[in-house]
Image (tube, rainbow, N blue to C red):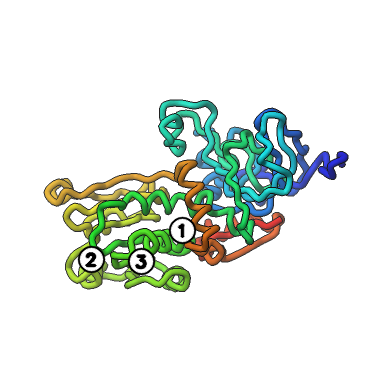
């Protein structure tokens, strides 16, 4: 313990062997230098990407770089100490959210504000150590978003991935929607419950239709943000149900948070000038079909949306601070660090409804 009450070592959950339970242990508490900031972690969210890291399927691609590894890229906390180059406005005790989509060096994308697609990404919890530990060293103060006025700091953590990714995806529809258009959110539960809220807030003129294969996910999301209709994607005749639900119009916009067997069905349901935003990465091995004829002749747009920019991260936190979105309800489970493994397992088995957060 040093004179500021910071322990020399602190507890962390380590991924030692892929697909095995995380192991509790101790790691050294670093002293921040230069632009760095040490934070006391309050919330560390569990995301579907954590399942991929835990399984080791991204290991060859460098995520994680080495084992043992500390997971979680959704981190909120309070400032403990700062390096000598950090501006004085950041003080011990400040509430912060960590923007996880960091980069090693500036490039033409980050210079243009596209911080979500840097040439050399560095992501805590994915390729370097993340938030399943009591203290976390942030490499640069520019990645910290002020969370003053946010009551529930642990529940804020998922806004750095789940709540950010859905925000950028929904904003892709800006300028494309007319009154009474139909917009679908495919994949409800945690991510879907953020997406529904952003749609309702930004596009009050449209009808929002949710789609999922699980009735409990539909109910969960509807309890957070009332939908205008919903579709159980596992129904037979799902194409017919879509046309009935949209009164024959189809969707002007689709936010696809699944990406597994959904592109074929829901891109077909897109209306003229419709825009399809692909977000979910789950089904990379699944064959999907896209009709060249209808995509061209109906001028459909198929686009990808990846996490969100640093600017968008500020916007999302502001929406939570002003109470314009409910950031607490999508969090369906809070757990101790010792139970982080079972949280990952819940996601892998498809048992989690909303977002799960490790709370310190
Ligand atoms: Zn994530």
- Asked if 211 appears above or below 277 in the picture, the reply is below
Where in the figure is residue 128, as x and y percent of width and height? Answer: 61, 36
C-alpha distance separating marks 3 and 1 = 12 Å
Above or below, 322 relative to 77: below
Q: CA distance from mark 2 to mark 1?
A: 24 Å
Sequence-first disc among 3 and 2: 3
Q: Is residue 230 left or right of residue 321?
A: left
The quadrant of the picture occupied by the N terminus is: top right
The residue closer to the viewer here, 146 or 215, is 146
**N-terminal of the two: label 2 or label 1?**
1
The image quadrant that residue 234 belongs to is bottom left
| Residue 329: quarter of image | bottom right
Label 2 element class: helix
Question: Which residue is painted at 21% across and 63% down in the image?
Answer: 250
The quadrant of the rendering that contains the C terminus is bottom right
Query: How far apart, in angstroms, are the residues tagged by discs 3 and 2?
Result: 14 Å
Q: Are marks 2 and 1 in contact (CB under 8 Å)?
A: no
- Relative placement, left or right, of 85 versus 52 is right
Secondary structure at numbered mark 1: helix
Please tell me whether mark 3 sits on a helix, a strand or a loop.
strand
Crowding near the residue tagged with mark 2, few <14, some 14–19, many ≥20 C-alpha atoms within 10 Å? some
Q: Which residue is mark 2?
A: 239
Q: Let me know if residue 23 appears in the view.
A: no
Residue occupying image coordinates x 20% and y 68%: 243
What residue does disc 3 label? 210
Name which residue lies at 60% across and 64% down: 333
- Badge 1 is on which residue? 191
Locate residue 233, reporting x and y percent: 33, 66
> Residue at position x 78%, y 44% from top?
10
Question: Is residue 195 something that shows in the picture?
Answer: yes
Q: Position of residue 284 (x, y in %)?
A: 38, 46
Residue 16 picture location, percent across and down:
67, 42
């Amino acid at each position: 313990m040093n004179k500021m009450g910071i322990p020399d070592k602190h507890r962390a959950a380590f991924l030692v062997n892929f697909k095995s339970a995380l192991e509790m242990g101790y790691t050294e508490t670093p002293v921040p230098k230069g632009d760095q900031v040490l934070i006391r972690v309050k919330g560390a969210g569990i995301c579907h990407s954590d399942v991929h890291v835990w399984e080791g399927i991204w290991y060859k691609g460098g995520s994680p770089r080495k084992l043992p590894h500390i997971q979680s890229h959704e981190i909120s906390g309070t400032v403990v100490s700062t390096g000598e180059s950090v501006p004085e406005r950041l003080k011990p005790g400040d509430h912060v959210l960590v923007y996880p989509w960091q980069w090693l060096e500036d490039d033409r994308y980050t210079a243009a504000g596209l911080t979500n697609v840097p040439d050399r990404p560095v992501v805590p919890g994915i390729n370097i150590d993340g938030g399943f530990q009591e203290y976390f060293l942030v490499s640069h103060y520019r990645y910290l978003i002020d969370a003053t006025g946010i009551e529930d700091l642990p529940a804020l953590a998922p806004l750095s991935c789940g709540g950010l990714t859905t925000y950028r995806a929904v904003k892709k529809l800006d300028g494309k929607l007319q009154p009474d258009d139909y917009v679908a959110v495919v994949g409800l539960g945690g991510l879907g419950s953020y997406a529904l809220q952003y749609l309702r807030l930004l596009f009050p003129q449209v009808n929002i239709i949710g789609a999922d294969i699980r009735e409990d996910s539909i109910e969960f999301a509807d309890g957070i943000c009332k939908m205008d209709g919903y579709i159980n994607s596992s129904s037979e005749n799902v194409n017919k149900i879509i046309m009935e639900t949209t009164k024959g119009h189809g969707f002007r916009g689709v936010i696809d948070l699944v990406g597994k067997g959904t592109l074929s069905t829901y891109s077909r349901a897109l209306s003229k000038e419709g825009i399809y935003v692909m977000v979910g990465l789950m089904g990379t091995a699944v064959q999907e079909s896209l009709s060249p004829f209808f995509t061209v002749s109906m001028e459909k747009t198929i686009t990808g949306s990846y996490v969100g920019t640093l600017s968008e991260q500020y916007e999302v936190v502001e929406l939570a601070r002003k109470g314009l979105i409910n950031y607490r309800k999508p969090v369906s489970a809070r757990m101790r660090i010792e139970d982080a493994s079972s949280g990952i397992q819940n996601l892998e088995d498809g048992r989690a409804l909303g977002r799960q957060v490790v709370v310190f």
